[in-house]
Every structure is written in structure tokens, then in C-alpha cells.
């Protein structure tokens, strides 16, 4: 993945964190499910990667925790989208 694409992922993660706070993981998981249900695999894959960046961001900000408090990304949703992507990520 190129630097610009990586920057876009982190930019989206930071934007959702800033706008939605603790609700960001739930909202992104909803977007992933919605895109997956409509067959938009590339979009679902993009948002799954954004979700991974958000998880990493929380791990950095909340040392020792993957996400703040009890908010979590649904790993089944993220894994199923990531594993089924045309990019193989």
C-alpha cells in the first residue's frame, strides 16, 4: 500500500475519532456491514482497514487497551471483510 493510501486510512480513522469519539468503532462497523451486505467489497475492505487504524490509534492513546472502555470493533466483521477482499488484506 502506498504512502498516500495509508495516509487516507489514518486520516479517516482520526476524523471518525474526532467526530464520533467512543461511538466511532460502532459506526465504522456498521458501515462495513452495510457495504458488505450490498456487495461493495472494496468499500467494505477500505473501512475494515480504517477500523484497524482506529484500533491501533486507541492502543496508542490508551496504553494497554485496544479501545477505550468497553467499546470494541467486532473482530468477526473486520476479519470477514479483510479476508474476503480482492486485495488479499
Image (cartoon, rainbow, N blue to C red):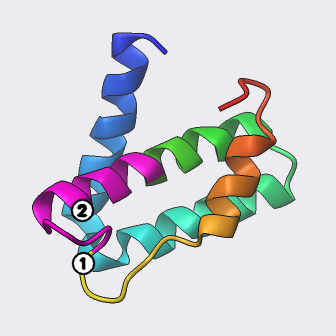
Q: Is residue 28 above or below residue 22?
A: above
Q: Are marks 1 and 2 in contact (CB under 8 Å)?
A: yes
Instruction: Residue 23: say if magenta.
Output: no
Left or right: residue 46 compared with residue 20:
right
Q: Which residue in the rendered view is the most extreme toward the front?
A: 64
| Secondary structure of the residue carrying numbered label 2 | helix
Magenta part of the chain: 52-67
Q: Where does the image place residue 66, in percent across and percent down from the top left?
A: 32, 67
Toward the viewer: 66 or 15? 66
Question: For the point 61% across and 61% down, which residue is it?
Answer: 31
Mark 1 or mark 2: name the one nearer the start of the chain. 2
Toward the viewer: 47 or 53? 53
Write down the quadrant of residue 32 in the picture.
bottom right
Toward the viewer: 20 or 10? 10
**Badge number at residue 20:** none
Write down the quadrant of residue 75 in the picture.
bottom right
Q: Where does the image place residue 59, in percent across and percent down from the top left?
A: 24, 60
Instruction: Residue 60: say if magenta.
Output: yes
| Secondary structure of the residue carrying numbered label 1 | loop
Q: Where does the image place residue 2, in percent across and percent down from the top left?
A: 43, 10
Q: Where does the image place residue 1, in percent across and percent down from the top left?
A: 49, 15
Q: Residues within 10 Å of mark 2 (few under 14, many from 20)?
A: some
Write down the quadrant of residue 76 in the picture.
bottom right
Left or right: residue 47 compared with residue 88:
left
**Badge number at residue 68:** 1
Question: For the point 79% across and 54% down, which residue is it?
Answer: 36
Question: For the point 73% across and 28% down, which residue is it?
Answer: 88
Q: Mark 2 — residue?
A: 58
Q: Give the main secondary structure of the magenta stretch.
A: helix
Q: Is residue 34 above or below residue 84?
A: below
Amino acid at each position: 500500500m502506498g504512502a498516500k493510501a495509508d495516509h487516507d486510512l489514518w486520516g479517516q480513522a482520526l476524523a471518525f475519532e474526532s467526530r464520533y469519539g467512543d461511538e466511532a468503532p460502532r459506526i465504522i462497523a456498521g458501515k462495513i456491514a452495510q457495504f458488505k451486505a450490498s456487495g461493495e467489497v472494496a468499500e467494505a475492505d477500505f473501512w475494515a482497514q480504517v477500523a484497524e487504524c482506529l484500533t491501533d490509534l486507541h492502543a496508542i492513546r490508551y496504553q494497554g487497551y485496544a479501545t477505550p472502555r468497553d467499546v470494541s470493533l467486532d473482530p468477526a466483521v473486520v476479519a470477514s471483510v479483510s479476508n474476503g477482499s480482492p486485495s488479499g488484506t
